[in-house]
Image (tube, grey):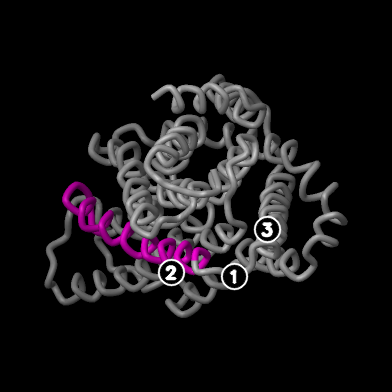
Amino acid sequence: MIESRRFFMQNLLDPAILFFIFGVLAGTVKSNLEIPPAISRFLSLYLLMALGLKGGFALSHSGLTATVGLSLGCAVALAVIIPWLGFWFLRRFTSDFNALAVAATYGSVSAVTFVTAVQFLETHNIPHGGHMAAAMALMESPAIIMAVVMAGSLRLKAAAGLTPPKSGDAVAVSPPAGPGRTIGKVLHESFTDGAQLLLLGAMAIGLLTGESGQAAMQPFSGDLFKGMLSFFLLDMGLMAARNLPQIRGNSPVLIAYAIAGPIVHASLALGLAYLFQLPVGDGILLMVLAASASYIAVPAVLRYALPEASPSLYFGLSLGITFPLNLIVGIPFYAAVAQKVLHSDSL
């Protein structure tokens, strides 16, 4: 409990987190403060590139080990289990398409939450593997694939009259992936997304260049990182505040899921990390990935792949509730719990 309180207070006083809170306050009072979309896009690409380089440099030191394989295997397992469990739970309280969209959103990951967690670990000198950036990339697509495939199955059943419509379902059966977008195209986009490719490409470059590359890129991927993260979190705070009104009118169960679901998902990750004796730093990042929810990549795909679902629901829950809670409270809480439960020689 003392460790959790210490982590929480230190996290709350971190400049990047304070900029996020400032952004939330500015958005709440309806300030005209705004980060231009082009700059916001640049910042997100910078963070992914810097994160990939850091991961590659770290991986060049540690090499490919059994621990790396176990960590990546746990990440893939969670990326399959979490959206499946989420769908079968949520469909009791909303339409099948809404349940599928929310489950896919929470089955994927938030890169910004992960980047912030990495910064948290570095601030507290908690060792972690650079390969966890690859784990993040691996966890993004399975939920999208599940959503696209299951949505097609739901449409076929609805068209055949095998399933009665629920409240919130579209009356008309929409095309499988939106106008002019086949399932294959949606899946191709999920695997070749520019952000993912940049992350993996930067990691490969970091792995190939090693120490010499790290020294050359330190001013870019090291010295600038904290300031860029703070600027981006300011923008995220503004977005979170502006999406809070979208949550009004939703079922209390769905709002509770946005709060309790991440804790359950993080607990699943902690169980796997304990079972396979992963290092504490890797276990913390695995918990953060499992607890996070996508608010960029998955919603962008779902808007076309699942037109029957309500974007205000899955986008509002992930960005309006889960993202702020994970950023301010979740990361220090997961770190404190993991340090008590996991065993590692690195500490």
Q: Quadrant of residue 70?
A: bottom left
For the record, the magenta segment spans 67-96
- The residue type indicated by label 1 comes to Leu
- Depth check, front residue: 233 or 336: 336
Q: Residue at x 43, y 43 (%)?
A: 318
User: On residue 64, which mark appears?
Assistant: 1
Q: Work out whether 120 lies above or below 280.
A: above
List the single residue furthest toward the front.
345
| Mark 2 Cα shell of 10 Å, populated few (<14), some (14-19), many (≥20) | some
Q: Secondary structure at mark 1?
A: loop
Residue 316 part of the magenta segment: no
| Mark 3 Cα shell of 10 Å, populated few (<14), some (14-19), many (≥20) | many
Residue 45, percent from left and from top: 69, 54
Asked if residue 30 can be seen in this view, the reply is: no
Q: Secondary structure at mark 2?
A: loop
User: On residue 178, which mark appears?
Assistant: 2
State which mark lies toward you, 3 or 2.
Answer: 3
